[in-house]
Image: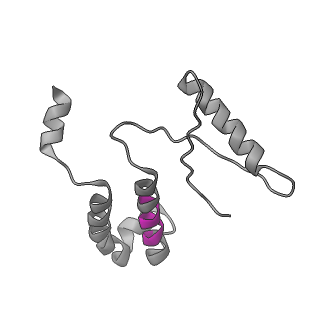
Amino acid sequence: MSIYLLDLELDGYDNEEDRKKACDVFIQDQLDFSASSVHFEHLEETVDGPTIKQLADLWNLCRKFINDHKPSCPEAIYQVDDINLACTDFAEEICSCVGFYNKESELKDEE
């Protein structure tokens, strides 16, 4: 199965709820035809939230880790030395993808 992230914006609607419903209908009408089916869910986006590309990059990073190290259960992460050792590099890659902690932004949030 192929999975896609789609950023769709339709103009001409009075509010976000109507726009969301119209997008749902559009996707269903355009993609759900004989011999295929479409399942979609809404990703909530915030002003400071990630872009679709950033979400896809994070997903691909996680899938690469899983494909490379093949953890078969939560316990494998702790008990298999190769997986455990790779976790520090993985954490660094995640932070590089989504951003490192920024104390200044924490102070701004508290105001």
For the N terminus, the quadrant is bottom right
Q: Which of the two residues, 19 or 49, is positioned nearer the viewer here?
A: 19
Side (left or right) of 6 relative to 1: left
Q: Position of residue 15 (x, y in %)?
A: 55, 22
Residue at the image point whose x is 74% and y is 48% from the top: 30
The secondary structure making up most of the magenta span is helix
Along the line of sight, the residue nearer the viewer: 2 or 17: 17
Direction front: furthest residue: 12
> Is 94 rendered above or below residue 85?
above
The image quarter in which residue 90 lies: bottom left
Horizontal side of 13 relative to 103 (left or right) equals right
Above or below — where is 50 with respect to 94? above
The residue at 20%/50% (across/down) is 101
Residue 107 percent location from the top left of the image: 13, 34
In the image, residue 19 sits, relative to residue 57, either above or below, namely: above
* Residue positioned 41% across, 59% down in the render: 58
Please name the colour scheme applied to the rendered image.
Answer: one colour
Q: Quadrant of the C terminus?
A: top left
Q: In front here: 67 or 6?
A: 6
Residue 18 picture quarter: top right
Is residue 64 one of those drawn in magenta? yes
103 in relation to 54, above or below: above
The answer to which quarter of the image holds residue 74 is bottom left
The magenta span reads: 58-65
Q: Residue at 36% of width from left, 66% of height from top?
A: 78
> Would you say 108 lies left or right of 23 here?
left
81 part of magenta stretch: no
Residue 47: x %, y % from top left: 36, 36
